[in-house]
Image (cartoon, grey):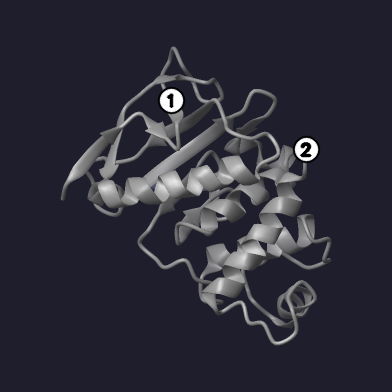
Amino acid sequence: MNLTAFSMIAGVPIRYARTKDHPYGTQGKPRTQQVTEEFLEKLDDCFTELWNVCPHGKAESITSGGAYVEKAGRHGEGRAIDIDAIWWANKVLITAGYNEHKRFYLGVEAIIRRHLGTVLGYLYNKAHHDHWHIDDGTEVKFTIRSRSRVMFMQAALLHIWGKHIAIDGIYGPATDGALRTCLDVNASVSYSEVWREWLLRTAVMGMGQKKEG
Ligand SMILES: [Zn+2]
């Protein structure tokens, strides 16, 4: 495993806010992290796109709880990062504040999901209420067997697309019916291109255009 140290993602400094002096919810202090070169490229692509699509543009800092750590799983392979918050000049997204800005949160998550397969956030479980866990251990692809993907889709359909459906992680007829009204006839979200296109439209709608999301 070849790790690369980095202090920026897509030109934006990484900070750390999980200490006594810099607690969660503050902008934190500069911190270098490590991931593989390949994973860093994916992060750069992901956040470059986020700065392009987001009405607030390029952020000023990204607060990360950590990337490579000596433990089992994707973090131990240098192929994961935890994101606590993103700070723009005129907007702050602290992930634990999901309930205060669901549309914006889900819009940002839609961009992340276009680049990295595994994204566990607020909806997934209590352990992820205060950060997004992001790794490339799974493909960028929609499958009804992925509870995190289905829950994200249901929340986006409800909060961004205005479809009245339950967020239960189960892809049933109600979710399927709601999704179909957001796709071209004959398009299936099981194709990566269709999934990624739907995510982009979801991101644009969720983050809003040139105003608060
Ligand atoms: Zn993690």
Up/down of 151 relative to 72, above or below: below
- Which residue shows up at 64% across the image and 59% down it? 200
Left or right of 95? Residue 205 is: right
Looking at the image, the residue that sits furthest to the left is 1
Count of labels shown? Answer: 2
- Which residue shows up at 45% across the image and 57% down it? 116
Residue 65 x/y as whole percent: 41, 34
Looking at the image, the residue that sits furthest to the top is 21
- Which residue shows up at 26% across the image and 47% down it? 36
Up/down of 179 relative to 34, above or below: below
- The residue nearer to you, when weighing 154 against 200, is 200
Q: Residues within 10 Å of mark 1 (few under 14, many from 20)?
A: many
Foreground mark, 2 or 1? Answer: 2
User: Does the image show residue 127?
Assistant: no
Left or right of 5? Residue 145 is: right
Looking at the image, the residue that sits furthest to the front is 52
| Quadrant location of the C terminus in the rendered image | top right
**Where does label 2 land, which residue?**
210
Tag 1: residue type?
Answer: Arg
User: Does the image show residue 26?
Assistant: yes
Looking at the image, the residue that sits furthest to the bottom is 186
Residue 119 x/y as whole percent: 49, 55
Residue 168 x/y as whole percent: 66, 67
Tag 2: residue type?
Answer: Lys
Q: Secondary structure at mark 1?
A: strand
* Mark-to-mark CA distance, 2 and 1: 26 Å
